[in-house]
């Protein structure tokens, strides 16, 4: 199974880009990871970088695609961020979201896991097949019946997380479950809240249907996100992964 990959990571109106992303692929096991960092004294970018480097290094050493391994990779990233916080207490409240996708290209199976509000979407057969649920205060309010889905993009406290890598409290991770068979046209999107806040799922689908490649799809969506530019615009990052019968395509898109 050939795989197309494209990504965009932009700073928005912030002083630094505290998002990080990366991937590691082989003929069989493949891994993509996105992290959105936060913390005092500019430590958010460091937190996100630790998450990405830890996940990729450990997956490269053991490219297993399983539910257990998807959880273990994020637990390892959490341990590394906590160790960094203890070694450098000036990086107060350093923490990060994380979302990772693992694909076995031979078996054509995928597993994913996440913590926080960086999301993973799966599109296929002309519809959205899966969307991760945020670990956030607003998502909890919606689940408890105290509001509707519109709150997720408009509530003043929409960025407050209930779980994140680097939080001292118990870490809550979500995992997709047993490996899921994927087809040649199935498409994954991994993105931070600075991305999905300004483009809803219906528009993601519309642009996917119109796009000619992963690269084109991300460009179309980035134009929509960029059109909402304001003095408080957050960093925004997205990775697209798609099965393809054609030759593997890898595109890096930056500002």
Image (cartoon, helix red, strand yellow):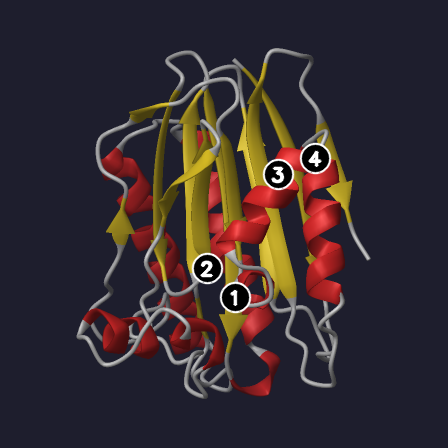
Circle 4 packing at 10 Å, graded few (<14), some (14-19), many (20+), is some
Q: Nearer the viewer, mark 3 or mark 1?
A: 3
**Which residue is located at x 22 percent, y 75 percent?**
169
Instruction: Please tell me the numbered disc located at residue 118.
Output: 2
Answer left or right for 173 relative to 207.
left
In the depicted view, which residue is nearer to us: 218 or 162?
218
Element type at mark 2: loop
Task: Please report whichever mark, 1 or 2, sits nearer to the chain's N-terminal start.
Answer: 2
Relative side of 140 to 56, left or right:
left
**Residue 215 horizontal/vertical position (percent):** 73, 37
Identify the residue position indicated by label 3 in the image. 208
**What residue did someone put label 4 on?**
211
Label 1 crowd (10 A; few <14 / some 14-19 / many >=20): many
**Contact check, label 1 and label 2, Cβ < 8 Å:** yes
Residue 230 appears at what percent x and percent y?
73, 81
Give the SS element for disc 3. Answer: helix
């Amino acid at each position: 199974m050939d795989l197309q990959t494209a990504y965009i990571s932009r700073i928005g109106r912030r002083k630094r880009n505290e998002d990080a992303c990366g991937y590691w692929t082989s003929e069989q096991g493949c891994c993509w990871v996105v992290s959105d960092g936060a913390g005092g004294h500019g430590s958010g970018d460091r937190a996100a970088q630790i998450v990405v480097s830890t996940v990729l290094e450990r997956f490269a050493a053991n490219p297993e695609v399983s539910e257990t391994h998807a959880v273990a990779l994020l637990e390892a990233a959490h341990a590394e961020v906590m160790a960094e916080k203890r070694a450098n207490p000036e990086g107060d409240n350093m923490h990060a979201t994380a979302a990772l996708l693992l694909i076995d290209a031979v078996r054509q199976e995928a597993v994913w896991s996440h913590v926080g509000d960086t999301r993973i979407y799966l599109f296929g057969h002309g519809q959205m097949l899966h969307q991760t649920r945020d670990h956030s205060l607003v998502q909890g309010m919606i689940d408890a019946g105290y509001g509707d889905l519109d709150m997720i993009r408009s509530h003043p406290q929409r960025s407050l997380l209930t779980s994140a890598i680097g939080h001292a409290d118990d870490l809550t991770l979500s995992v997709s479950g047993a490996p899921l068979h994927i087809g040649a046209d199935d498409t994954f999107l991994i993105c931070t809240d600075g991305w999905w806040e300004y483009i809803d799922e219906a528009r993601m689908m519309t642009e996917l249907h119109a796009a000619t490649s992963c690269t084109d799809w991300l460009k179309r969506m980035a134009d929509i996100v960029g059109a909402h530019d304001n003095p408080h615009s957050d960093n925004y990052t997205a990775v697209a992964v798609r099965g393809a019968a054609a030759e593997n395509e890898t595109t890096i898109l930056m500002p």
